[in-house]
Structure formats: structure tokens, C-alpha cells
Amino acid sequence: MSSSLAPGLYIVAGPIGNLSDLSPRAAEILREADLIAVEDTRVSAKLLRHAGSDRPMVPYHDHSDERVRARLVERMASEAVALLSDAGTPLISDPGYKLVRDAREAGRAITTAPGPCAAIAAITLSGLPSDRFLFMGFPPSKTKARTDALNEVAALRASLIFYESGPRCAASLADMAAVLGDRPAALCREISKAYEETLSGTLTDLSAACTVKEPRGEIVIVVGPPGERAAPEADEIDAALRDALARLPVSQAAGEVSRALGLDRKTLYARAMELKGKA
Ligand code: SAM
């Protein structure tokens, strides 16, 4: 109750390697909060020392006992509770989602001190399209599950961002090349630290490089979107429409081919009517 902060939940982004990236506002919250929910008290103790904070910590994970979460949400009614991860932004491949969900359901005040996030830092470093991207978190470690997850997003016109560990990089990149095609990609490691490095190349190039020398440290892989497809020939369009018309009414057939080939639905509808002999 000693806090000069209003009661509620404060989501605090910490550095992803370079302590100087802790924002002044984040440091102030860490100094003023009544309580700081952390993943690992030993890891966070270092950051709290850097911020000049002596506030008490409590370990929190989304798989913590429900009572731990309920107690934190209860305390937010009258105290300022900060949520801090070992690195970067809480909730991003880190605990916090269930705490925020429950705090919101309970009507608690929630704010964030936004800051470093390895996924966002990597897309900015990668030189790959940043207008649309999908954060994939850590890909599954087993090949079958990883391949299935990649297949789900293979057609998306967006860059893909993955967190990965050094020993898995070569196999992951090889699966990405096999499922997504040999797209341009970037491997960003140790962002904001002394040995920060970004390797660019095709997925096959990067997989080969990681086989020769396993990358060290913390890693983000960014994969570019699929290449632009050449405009389909009239024959290809007619064949797709005929195939769809054999199974579907005209308007649905036009819709299916429009989605599959990325062409204008109205134009395809008119062509489908011609093919049906109804125009
Ligand atoms: N919450 C963090 C964030 O905002 O980025 C991510 C936490 S997740 C448990 C840890 C993973 O993030 C690492 O295994 C690595 O893939 C990525 N990561 C964290 N710090 C990094 C850094 N400095 N350079 C590259 N990747 C990093």
C-alpha cells in the first residue's frame, strides 16, 4: 500500500539483453510497485538491482496454482502489481496471458510499459517485408508437428517470425525450406548484446550454414512471404472454373477460384456463366 502508483496491473517490458534498454518509465514502475510477479526471482533480481528497486517479488507462471493468480488479481484491487518476464515483453512466449485475462474479467485497471521484444526487433533487422507478419512463437520440436504447423501458414502472404534454439536451427530451417519453399530469410541472434548478428539468405542457405556451425545464443528466424505468383493463363483459369463448376453452383465456383488464384470474383463469375452456356 506504500506505492505512489494507482492500484492495478502494470505489464512491464524488460530488456532482451542490453540493460540500458529498460525504459525510465518501466524502471519507475519497478521501483514503485507494491509487488512484482516474475518468472524467476534470481533472473529478475539482477534487473531490479539495475533499476534501483527493492520491491518484493513473487514467482508467477500461467501454469501456477489458480489460487496464486486469484490472489494476485485480488491484490490488484488495492495495490500496484507489476508483471515482469525474464526478458522482453511479458506474454510474448512468456507467462501473463491468464493473469491479464483474469484481471480484465475482474475489472482491474491494467496498463503497460511497452518496450523490447525479440520478435519485433528481428523483423526490423531482417530486411524482409514488415507490412504483414505472423508471430509463430517456438515451432514444435518434432518434425511431424513442425511440418503440420508450417503447412497451416504456407499460403499466407506475410512474413513469419519464429523463436528458435541453436541446436534446432538447422532442422527447423530445412523443414521450413521443404514446406514453405526456398524463401528469403534472416537469422537474428543475440539482439542488443555484444555478439549481435544477422545472417541473411535463403532458407536452404541458412540451414546449411547452421549445419556447418551451430549458432550460439538466443535466436529469432524471420521468413519472407511467398513470392508473387505469375498471372495465370486463360487456359488455367478455365480449367479451374470447369473443375469447380463440376462440383459447385456458379457463384460458389467463382468464389473458390477467386480465392485460389487471387483473381477478381465478378470477372470469374461472368466467365463461369459463359462456360456454363448461360451467359
Ligand atoms: N518475451 C520475450 C520477448 O519479448 O521477445 C521472449 C521470451 S522467449 C521465452 C525467449 C526467446 O526469445 C529466445 O529463445 C529467443 O528465441 C528470443 N530472444 C530473446 N532475446 C533475444 C535476443 N536478445 N536475441 C535474439 N532472440 C532473442
Image: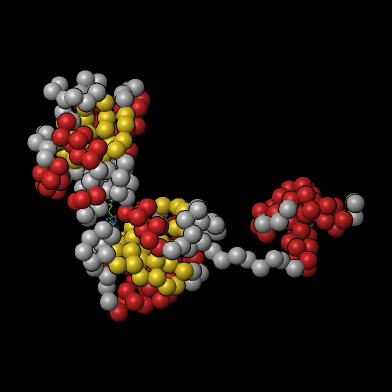
Q: Residue at x 21, y 30 (%)?
A: 81
Instruction: Determine whether, in the image, residue 47 is placed left or right of residue 223.
Output: left
Residue 189, percent from left and from top: 29, 64
Colour scheme of the picture? secondary structure
Viewer-proximal residue among 215 and 242 = 215
Quarter of the rendered structure image containing ligand 1: bottom left
Residue 252 vs residue 138, the one in the foreground: 138
Name which residue lies at 27% across and 77% down: 213
Q: Judge left or right: residue 209 versus residue 75.
A: right
Q: Provide residue 177's location: percent of width, then percent of height.
A: 45, 70
Tell which of 71 and 222 is nearer to you: 222
Q: Is residue 197 above or below residue 68?
A: below
Q: In the image, is 68 to the left or to the right of 258?
A: left
Name the spot of residue 256 as percent of width and height, x first. Answer: 69, 52
Q: Quadrant of residue 168?
A: bottom left
Q: Is residue 8 left or right of residue 160?
A: left
Does residue 63 appear in the picture of this structure? no
Identify which residue, 157 or 193, lies in the foreground. 193
x%, y% of residue 187?
Answer: 35, 66
- Does the image show residue 39? yes
Please name the residue shown 49% across and 72% down the image. Answer: 182
Q: How many marks?
A: 0
> Which of the 4 quarters of the picture holds residue 218?
bottom left
Work out whether 254 lies above or below 65. below
Residue at figure coordinates x 21%, y 48% from the top left? 86
* Figure quadrant of the N terminus: top left
Q: Among all residues in the image, which is located at the extreme bottom? A: 212
